[in-house]
Image (cartoon, helix red, strand yellow):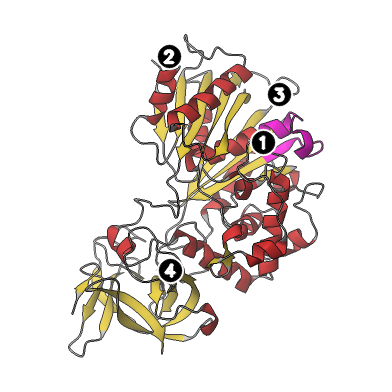
Amino acid sequence: MARPVREGLFTERSDGSIRLLGGYSPTSGKYHFPVQEVCPYSGAADVEPVELGPDGHLWAWTAVTAPPPGYQGEVPFGFGVVELPEGLRVITRLEVDAPSELQYGMTMRLVAAPVGDDVVTYSFEPA
Amino acid sequence: MSVEIAGVGIHPFGRFEDRTVTDLGIVAVRDALVDAGLPAGPPARFQAAFCGTAYAGVAAGHKVLGALGLTGMPIIDVEAGCASGGAALMLAAGAIRAGQYDCVLVFGIEKMPKGIIRSSFFESWREEAGLAATPAYFALRAQRLMRESNVTKQHLADVVVKNRGQGIHNPNAMFRKEVAADEVLGSRVVCEPLHLWMLCSPNEGAAAVVLRRAEAAAAGNVTLAAAALRSHLPGSVLSEATPLSGLTEEGIDPATTLAARAAYEEAGIGPSDVDVVECQDTDAARELLSYEELGLCPHGDAAKLVDEGATRMGGRLPVNPSGGLLSKGEPLGASALGQVVELATQLRGAAGPRQVEAARVALGHTVGRGANASVVILER
């Protein structure tokens, strides 16, 4: 697979699918993403790396029509927030760039998506 | 003991190719010192200076005061995103209340890069993935407001029409032309539901305020009743100016609500006592959200305030008589103090054609990166 946009954001399975890599702290009982060394809700250093989702529900969406700073890929692209079953809202790209085609609460599937040459990031598409 | 707004000064907000950020600051600082009846050169009559800025770089405040021969005292640059000027004001007022200083200069300066704001706030991977798309976050927040209340795109356009209409009377604003709702809705979609004219323009400018300790507020003088700054609570998403991933828990108070609550308590007043407001209209939906977060209306009633015309000039509670950031543009470090200059001018009854009648209590609000939110209350 092409280079991930950042190491440690997601893992790749043998079937080519990906899983978001989050953190869980037994102290707070809460999940976070991306995983960090201490829990952002309790400060506890007991964070366990966990695979999140993979599927979620669409909570908010739009389309980005002009390239944001530091971005070399194509526009427009979909952009939004997906709610994961772990009780987490994740800022993400979306594979649909026409806002009118998306609906609040629809089931979204995690996918790997290219951004620029030979770089992939996580994204979601309607299931 | 009270903290008086002894003087205010401003350099117009806009684009000034032939002026450095230091040049802009010099104009605002000189005007504020003269307005306060203080010399605009040495020896300095203020004992400390706080300078709000996000992009002006190392020792930016020193460069402004150095050009005027006004150095020797502590000069401290303060960065708190869009609330930088509010943060500087809070620190200055606190120092005066603590008895550390009698007179403090507070100013804000900025010369923003053009286009979508590039910010070191975002890690490089977020930029590479296209996630550093600032207007998209505003759009998601606007969509949420529309989903959870009866705010429509028409209301967003109405806010732009209101603020741009009010801005024509402000000589310090960048845009001084009225616009019609159909023109706003006909402008290019930047990030659905936000069209180009619903977003403020990052630009350049400076503003300055002289704060002075007063044993008893002299009749007619404007005093700083509160200057509160708050940051976001863990887990909140999209209620902030720069939401990152977080919890699905609802009911986490946003930074603006926290700052407003603290400011009302500090001033010993409530939202119903306020006569005029300058609030953060980075985008049209942000103004509506501010109505709710500042407690100017019950949760979910922002659209009603617009429909009733309550926040227009002549309404029950005029909001952004200066034209707001939608008319003035937004120079981050200067915008909060720009509001204070406007509100002090309103309370002095010197705002000319944009004067809010009989205004005695004024509230200024900024919120942005961090998240940071500031709420300032002035009284006369």
**Where are the magenta residues, as a range?**
B344-362
**Mark toward the start of the polypeptide (4 vs 1):** 1
For the residues labelled 3 and 1, say whether their Cβ atoms are less than 8 Å apart: no
**Mark toward the start of the polypeptide (1 vs 2):** 2
Label 2, on which residue? B69
Q: Chain of mark 4?
A: B
Above or below — where is B20 with respect to A53?
above
Residue type marked 3 = Asn
Q: CA distance from mark 3 to mark 1?
A: 24 Å
Above or below — where is B374 with respect to B18?
below
Mark seen at residue B247: 4
Q: Secondary structure at mark 1?
A: loop
Mark seen at residue A99: none
Label 2 CA crowd tier, 10 Å (few <14, some 14–19, many 20+): some
- The answer to whether residue B164 is left or right of residue B375 is right
Q: Secondary structure at mark 4?
A: strand
Q: Chain of mark 2?
A: B
**Mark toward the start of the polypeptide (3 vs 4):** 3
Spot occupied by residue B378 in the image (x, y as percentages of width and height)? 66, 34
State yes or no: residue A105 in magenta.
no
Label 3 CA crowd tier, 10 Å (few <14, some 14–19, many 20+): some
State yes or no: residue B350 in magenta.
yes
Q: Chain of mark 1?
A: B
Label 3, on which residue? B221
Q: Chain of mark 3?
A: B
